[in-house]
Amino acid sequence: MINDTTIALAKKLWDYHHMHHALEKADCILVLGSHDLRVANRAAELYLQQWAPIIIFSGGLGNFTKEMWTETEADLFAAIAIQMGVPANDILIENKSTNTGENILFTQQLLTQKNLDPQSFIVVQKPYMERRSYATFKKHWPDKKLIVTSPQISFEDYPTEEIPLEKVINIMVGDLQRIKYYPEKGFQIYQPIPGDVWQAYEQLIASGFDKHLMKD
């Protein structure tokens, strides 16, 4: 059941997952695929505002999208960007990755194939995936300059019929667990978690928001 207490706890996680980076011009916009098509809109807006000259869309079919779509995340996102006015010549597509680590590794391989070596990136992701994306990127690509951003949507306005609030809270809880434990697995760099944020996480699990927790 989602009540006012649940909302307050979830907002604490939502705020923590945001990196609050200020935009700066970069060599490349790297868009991490997901079930949220608004991420593609945000990336296209950034390109059209001339924050970077090229966009890479990265994403095959992941845990959520393999049950939703037959076309890959990257291809769907790229189609949205082209429809918004982004030239196809300025778009690169990596459509094999199934998780955030693969997003980075397969993008590295794609850039090597294209003889490109961008030094700075604007990474675009869902709002509650900003911090985990940052920690993963910095693990696999520590020497690159990185800004993370997401669709500019409040916690209250974020849920949709396709992405209901219950699902958002479950994912945020699972991603916080991964932020804590993935560094020791070599998947991400360490990120400090304030005590009140971890307490909110534990309270949400006790309330039944445990659908996206790691299985091991």
Image: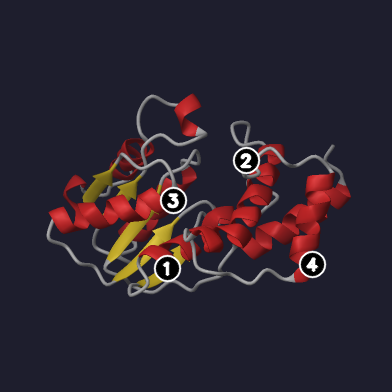
Identify the amino acid type marked 2.
Answer: Lys
Question: For mark 2, what is the residue?
Answer: 215
Cα distance between the residues tagged 4 and 3: 26 Å
Tell me which label, 3 or 1, sits earlier in the chain: 3
User: Visible in this render: residue 44?
Assistant: no
Q: From the top left corner, tell me how far across and down residue 85 is, in percent.
A: 28, 47
Marks 3 and 2 sit apart, C-alpha to C-alpha, by 17 Å
> Mark 2 or mark 1: which comes first in sequence?
1
Residue 148, how many percent across, how many down?
46, 64
Front tag of 4 and 2: 2
**On the image, numbered disc 3 is attached to which residue?**
100
Q: Name the residue under label 1.
A: 138
Residue 173, compared with residue 24, is above or below; it is: above
Q: Which amino acid does label 4 sit on?
A: Asp
Residue drawn at the location 49% of the way across and 38% of the way down: 35
Badge 4 or badge 3: first in the primary sequence: 3
Amino acid type of disc 3?
Thr
Q: In this view, does 19 lie above or below 47?
A: below
In percent of width and height, residue 105 lies at: 32, 54
Please name the amino acid that badge 1 sits on.
Lys
CB under 8 Å between discs 3 and 1: no
Q: Distance between the residues labelled 3 and 1?
A: 12 Å
Q: In whole angstroms, how far apart are the C-alphas of marks 2 and 1?
A: 25 Å
Alpha carbon of mark 4 to alpha carbon of mark 2: how far? 24 Å
- Cβ atoms under marks 4 and 1 closer than 8 Å: no
Q: Name the residue under label 4.
A: 196
What SS does tag 1 mark?
helix
Left or right? Give the position of 71 relative to 167. left
Task: Tell me the element at label 2.
Answer: loop
Whether residue 190 appears in this view of the structure is yes
